[in-house]
Image (tube, helix red, strand yellow):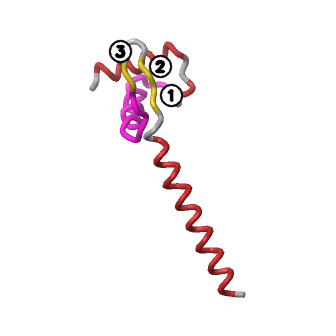
Amino acid sequence: MRGSRCGAAWLALAAIIFVSVSAAGCTARVRYYDDEHHDDHRWNNHEVVVYHSYWDGWRQPYRNYSTLNRDEQCDYWKWRHEHN
């Protein structure tokens, strides 16, 4: 009985690791098209860091990129191209 509990625990741990790694791989596949500059941008960990620095300059409460309206998203990509 004890061996089956230990095996189940290892199986659960392996599943958690698999899901974590799979989810991390998906973040690099998210792309946004910049209409004004006519190019694609990958949303990855580096872009998250840059986006946070963008918000630090605004001195406003942080908002996720996905909650921004179209004009606000365009403003971000314009800033992004100027601060490459």
Residue assigned mark 1: 65
* Residue at position x 49%, y 44% in the image: 26
Q: Callout 2, which amino acid?
A: Gln
Left or right position of 25 against 8: left
Depth order, front residue of 23/61 = 23
Residue assigned mark 2: 73
**Element type where label 3 sits in the image:** loop
Q: Callout 1, which amino acid?
A: Tyr
* Residue at position x 59%, y 63% in the image: 15
Q: Point out residue 36 in the picture as x, y percentages from the top left corner.
A: 39, 12
Q: Marks 2 and 1: CB-CB under 8 Å?
A: yes
Mark positioned earlier in the residue sequence (2 or 1): 1
**Element type where label 1 sits in the image:** helix
Q: Point out residue 66 in the picture as x, y percentages from the top left corner.
A: 55, 28
The local crowd at label 1, few if under 14, some if 14 to 19, many if 20 or more residues have their Cα within 10 Å, is some
The quadrant in which residue 49 appears is top left
Q: Marks 1 and 3: CB-CB under 8 Å?
A: no
Q: Point out residue 43 in the picture as x, y percentages from the top left corner.
A: 43, 34
Q: Residue 37, labelled with which disc?
A: 3
Mark positioned earlier in the residue sequence (1 or 3): 3
Against 27, residue 64 (above or below) is: above
Q: Which residues are magenta?
A: 41-60
Task: State the separation of the CA atoms marked 2 and 1.
Answer: 7 Å
> Residue 1 in magenta?
no
The quadrant in which residue 31 appears is top left
Left or right position of 8 against 55: right
Q: Main secondary structure of the magenta part?
A: helix
> Residue 51 in magenta?
yes
Mark positioned earlier in the residue sequence (3 or 2): 3
* Residue at position x 36%, y 33% in the image: 50
Depth order, front residue of 44/64 = 44
